[in-house]
Each structure stands twice: as structure tokens, then as C-alpha cells.
Image (cartoon, helix red, strand yellow):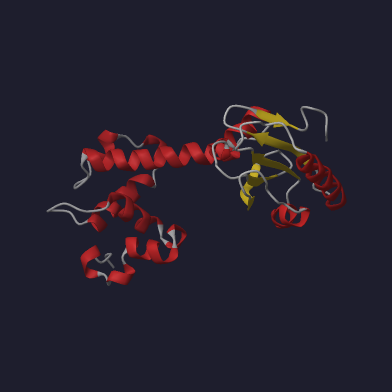
Amino acid sequence: MSTPSLSQRALIDRPREKLTRKGPASLSDFELLETIIGSGTRTSDVSYIARQVQKMMAGGVDSLTIEKLTSLRGVSTATAAKLLAALELAKRYLLRDEQPLTSQQDVLVRLSDIRGKQQEHCVCLSLDGGQRLLAQRTITIGTLDAVLAHPREVFSDPIVDRAASVIIAHNHPSGDAQPSQKDITLTQQLVAAGQMLGIPLRDHIIVSKKDHYSFRQHHLL
């Protein structure tokens, strides 16, 4: 049985509307392709184009090229470029998250988005036994000069993640990455809680726009 064209489907069943209501995870591979492609041509409905692209992808996405995609009826150079860009972006981010965070620089890359925040953001990175990232979450958002975090807030999700260790980080909007007494006290509490839970605190990192401070590097863990 052939797939109904996009125009033949009820509005609520169309991929963009479904994505808006339920999120991208609710879409099939075919519907995701329809969403990326966006629209068809005068001779080829978007559903037909998506089905042809899906068949070609079944043979392996690494071999896809502009030339191969544009050989399909209805696939323009612009559409082919959009598909290849989406695949490359997904590949880069998936591979990045599979890489273990073995160095301090690896961790700092993950913290780049909080460096310039005007309020203190406390984030927790859950790591597996191979030091790969399981999840990164914002725990609390504080005022201009203070952030409040409690061990139960920090460790509640890593317990569910079955994390082997955690890294805590927060930013200093003042630009001074040196720890305050509150930062030192919090770190001591997290070390104790991590030992009790069997999820050790691997590091506590403070970042500012141009600097950072690692408790591990300064032998304070």
C-alpha cells in the first residue's frame, strides 16, 4: 500500500505538526525525512521524495553524495545539501558525546555555554565508567553573585543515570574564577556525599569568561 501524499493526510498527522505537538522522537524515520526536505516539486510530492531518499539511505549514509541524491527525481541541489548537512551535524555531535572526557580541556569545551552567563549556573555532568558523558544538566541558577546547590539536587539524577562519577561546574559572572568559601564548603559536602553514594566527585570547575579554576588541579579533592 502506497504512502498517502502529505496533502492527503489530516493536518494533525503531518510531520511538522506532530513534531510540534509531541517532539521529534515521535516521528518515524520517513517523517523526519519529510520534515527536513520540507516541500516537494511540481512533479514530485515530498512524500515520494522522502521515500526515495530513505531507500537510498538504507544502503548506508556514508556513501551519500550530492550527485547520488540529486539523481533522484525531485531532489534539488539545495535539498541534497540540506540532507547531507543534517547527517553531518548529527554525526559530529553523536561522535563527540561518545568520546571520553579524559582531559580538563575536554570538560571545558562542554562548559563554554555558561562562561558568559550573567547569573551563576551550576551544572552536573554524569559520567560512565569509561568517563563518557551520560548527561549534562543545569542544577540551579543563582543570583549575580551566589548559587545555591545541595548534594541531593546534584546527585539525584546521577543516581538514576547509574553514573560512575560526576563533575560539577559553575560560572562566576564577576570574571574572577577563584573559589569563594561557599564554593569550598559545597565541594567538601559533595565529596562526602559522593563517597557515601559510591559516585565520586571527579572535579569541581569554576569558569569565567577568560579563566577557570579546577579543585582537582589544585589538590582540593
Q: Residue at x 48, y 36 (%)?
A: 92
Give the total of numbered labels. 0
Q: Quadrant of residue 77?
A: top left
Q: Quadrant of residue 107?
A: top right
Residue, far left: 42
- In this rendering, the answer to whether 100 lies above or below 51 is above
Choose between 1 and 76: the one closer to the eye.
76
Q: Residue at x 72, y 56 (%)?
A: 153
Q: Quadrant of residue 101?
A: top right
Measured as percent of width and height from the top left, residue 84 is found at 35, 39
Measured as percent of width and height from the top left, residue 94 is found at 52, 41
Choose between 144 and 211: the one closer to the eye.
144
Is any part of residue 42 visible from this angle?
yes
Q: Residue at x 77, y 53 (%)?
A: 151
Q: Taking 60 as reference, is 153 left or right?
A: right
Q: Quadrant of the C terminus?
A: top right
Measured as percent of width and height from the top left, residue 4 is found at 25, 67
Choose between 107 and 57: the one closer to the eye.
107
Q: Residue at x 41, y 60 (%)?
A: 28
Q: Taking 34 as reference, is 180 left or right?
A: right
Measured as percent of width and height from the top left, residue 210 is found at 58, 27
